[in-house]
Every structure is written in C-alpha cells, then in structure tokens.
Image: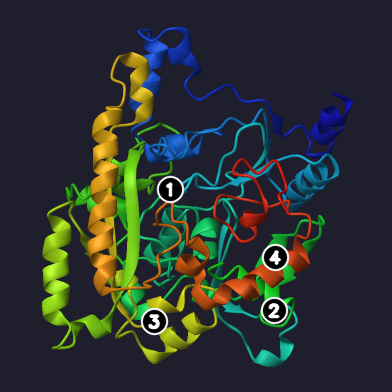
Amino acid sequence: MAAWAGLGRAVAGRLLEPAPLLAPCRIDAKGAECASLLKSLRNPYFIGDQPLGTQVSGWLDAWTPGRSPYVVAAQTPADVVAAVNFARIHNLRLAVKGGGHSYQGTSNADDSLMIWTRALRAVTVHDAFVPTGGDDLGSGTPAVTLDAGAMWMDAYDAVTTQAGRYVQGGGCATVGVAGLIQSGGFGSFSKRYGLAAASLLQAEIVTADGVLRTVNARRDPDLFWAIKGGGGGPARGWWDAQGRRKRGSTAMLFDERPSAPPHHAWWADDQEQVGAFLHGYDSMWLSKALLAPAGRPRLGEALFNASRHMSVALHFNKGLAGAPETALAATRDTATHPGVLDAFALAIIATGGPPAYFDLIGYPPDLGNARRNAAKVAAAAAVLRAVAPGAGSYVSESDYFNADWRAAFWGPHYPRLRAVKAKYDPGGLFIVHHGVGSEDWSADGFTRLT
C-alpha cells in the first residue's frame, strides 16, 4: 500500500478508488438512488463523467465493462507521466480512457490502473499556430489545441459556434477528441475535409518510458504518423445546440443536470447507442469501382441479399472517393487503411439491444436472440465481402472477432506501425484488444506470449 500512497502523492491526491458504476442498484435495486442512476445512464454526458462508465454496456461474448480498482483522474501532463511510470515500474495492466466510446472495449480493463483524462478539457483557438520547431514555416495557420479529455461538442462550440471556423472531427457529440483522431476520425463533413487525423498538426504524448514528447512532422515524425489513424466554412449553426433549442428543434437532446454547460447536447438519433449492448458489428470500405457500369448489378444484388439477413447502412461521409485532392493527400500521410481513399462509402452492419445493466431490475438481455442477431450480421457481411474481397474495415467501427484485423484495419501500413510500436513501447505497456502489437499478448493483456 505504500507504493499506492506514493502514487497518490505524486498526482496530488487524484488517485481514486471508484465504486462500481452500478453499486447503488446492487445494494437496493428498487431504491430511489438506483432509479436515479438508471435514468442518468440514458445521458451520455453523465456516463462519461463516471470513471468506470462506458458509452456502450458491452458486446455479446466479447467484453463487459471492466473495473479498475485505482484510477488516476489526470489534470496535468505530469499526472499522466506519474501514472505511466508507476504502471511500467510495477508491471501493471494499464487502461486509458477519455470519452469511453470504444465499441471494442479498449478504454477499460479489469484489474488495471486507469488513466482517466476527462478533466483535461481545455479548448484553445489560435489565429496563427506554428508547430514546435517550425519557425521557418511562416506566420502559422488557424488551429485549435484540444486537451486529451475534450469532447467534440466542446470543440465545435468553441471553434464553429463561437469563432465561426471549422474543425474536422466526429459526428457524435460526446466522442473524445484524442481517441477519434488516433482511429482516423470521420465526421459529418469528411467527404469535403477528409479525416480528423489528417488535420493533426502537433500532439503532446506520454510514451511508455514516461517521457512527455511534443511530436509533429519534424519531431519524432514516425510516432506522429503512427498516432494519425493508428484519425471557416459550412454549417456554422450545425452544432449550435442553444440555437436549436431556441428554435424548438428536437434534433438534439440536452444534458439537463444543473451544472452542465448549455452547449452539452447530443443528437437524438444517437440516443439508441447510449448504454447499448452490442450483438454484432462489422464494416467494410466499398470501392468506387463497384459503381462502374459493370459493377453496379453485382453491388445492387449484394446489398439486397445482405439486407435479407440484416439491414445495411451506407455511410457516404466515411468514404473519401470524390473528396478534394488536398484531403486525399493529407489522408495518404496517415496510418488509416488506404481503402478509404477510393471508397464511395463505408458499409456498416450492426445491431444490439437495450443496456445490459438493465438486468438489475429484472430485464436481462435475451442472449438467444442476441446470438441469432450476431449470426445475421456475420451472414450479411459475408454477402458484401463476396463482391468486395479484401475490403478493409474502419477500426473504430469493426468486428471485435475479426481474425484478420491487422490487414483489415491498417492494410499495408501495419508493418510500419509495428516498427514504431517496437521503438517507443518495447515492453508493451500500452496494449488493447486488436491494437498494434496485441498479437504478442494474451487476450486479457496480462501475459506476454512472445
């Protein structure tokens, strides 16, 4: 315990021992505190404000929310450095969580030390930003600095609603900035502006050796490339939550807690995702070649046949075919699967059910139906892959059980990512399910296999 006490002092008392998220309901499933909690769990901002909260409540036969006995609620980069050093020295499983939106469950792990970045939420708009070491690059460019725990709604409110500019980020308001950029990052206007990762100018990152590094195209360029996907103009009122509220729009729902910022809202269409229990999920890039006259009949037939098993959604904003050359060039300099470059859309086949934690009040998940749905997702995906063989997947929206995940997520970029991983994290401190280098570890991340 002396070691833990030392960590607590090193992070100025910000070492938490959080109770399980559902503790009030475990104590009294019919009590007022449990009822209040279950109501709050329909609010994605509330979930994100809980150290052990996850935006989905698990995935059938894949993962359920894990519990970290200790959480460092980081407020400074020094807190992150202290936690990383402590985990490395004491050979601990480490989890890192910002928004907690990982469908794959990568922002939580049982028996781990968690670094929780929720409190790091500053958003700073720059008129002329010059990357460190880039004094010869002129007078700089308009940019925004976003702390690791910032959500895209905070970014949009500052950059677009208030400053009248645009930043490429995610479409879901409560997704964390850092996680989305590292996955590639698609949003409502990606077809015009490309990936969030492609817009990254510079990042501060704590590596496994406990060093706080400022990385950009000139400083540690290999690491800078690896974190980019390894993720003015239109629609100034798009994220203006208060403006929508005043107009009586029902497109957004609001965080009604008294302490909530007035711009904290989320799209009503995203409500079904809050706390959802995933049954099955898969995605694939659909090449523009399938739209050529020779390919259209095959594509149309495949979409119809796939839909006999499970509905198929085509996310046209998540394929960059037809995007401006500037957006394509920037995307080529990221670790994102190159299949996105000529994809006219990302096909997503997914389904789920009500939050799994509702079993606390007598409504357990229907596992038989969930498994039937999972099989339907797999069958529909197989039909589409027959006309798009070798199509990659978007890492943030993909199949948890994909055995060929390295090729599916990163394609030819994987060997380079593997080399960067070996250089900056030779001990494998940062390991998540189907993340770079995870093939060297057991599924729970505790045992090195090679």
| Residue 103 numbered mark, or none | 1
Rendered residue at 43%/48% (across/down): 103
Q: CA distance from mark 2 to mark 3?
A: 22 Å
Of labels 1 and 4, earlier in sequence is 1
The residue indicated by pointer 2 is 221
Q: CA distance from mark 2 to mark 4?
A: 13 Å
Rendered residue at 67%/54% (across/down): 440
Q: Nearer the viewer, residue 403 or 321?
A: 403
Q: Amino acid at mark 3?
A: Leu
Rendered location of residue 12, percent (x, y):
79, 36
Q: Amino acid at mark 4?
A: Lys
Element under label 1?
A: loop
Rendered location of residue 381, percent (x, y):
27, 59
Q: Is residue 144 visible?
A: yes
The residue indicated by pointer 3 is 341
Of labels 2 and 4, earlier in sequence is 2
The residue indicated by pointer 4 is 421
Q: CA distance from mark 1 to mark 3?
A: 24 Å
Q: Nearer the viewer, residue 368 or 361?
A: 368
> In the picture provided, is 435 more to the left or to the right than 88?
left
Of labels 4 and 3, earlier in sequence is 3
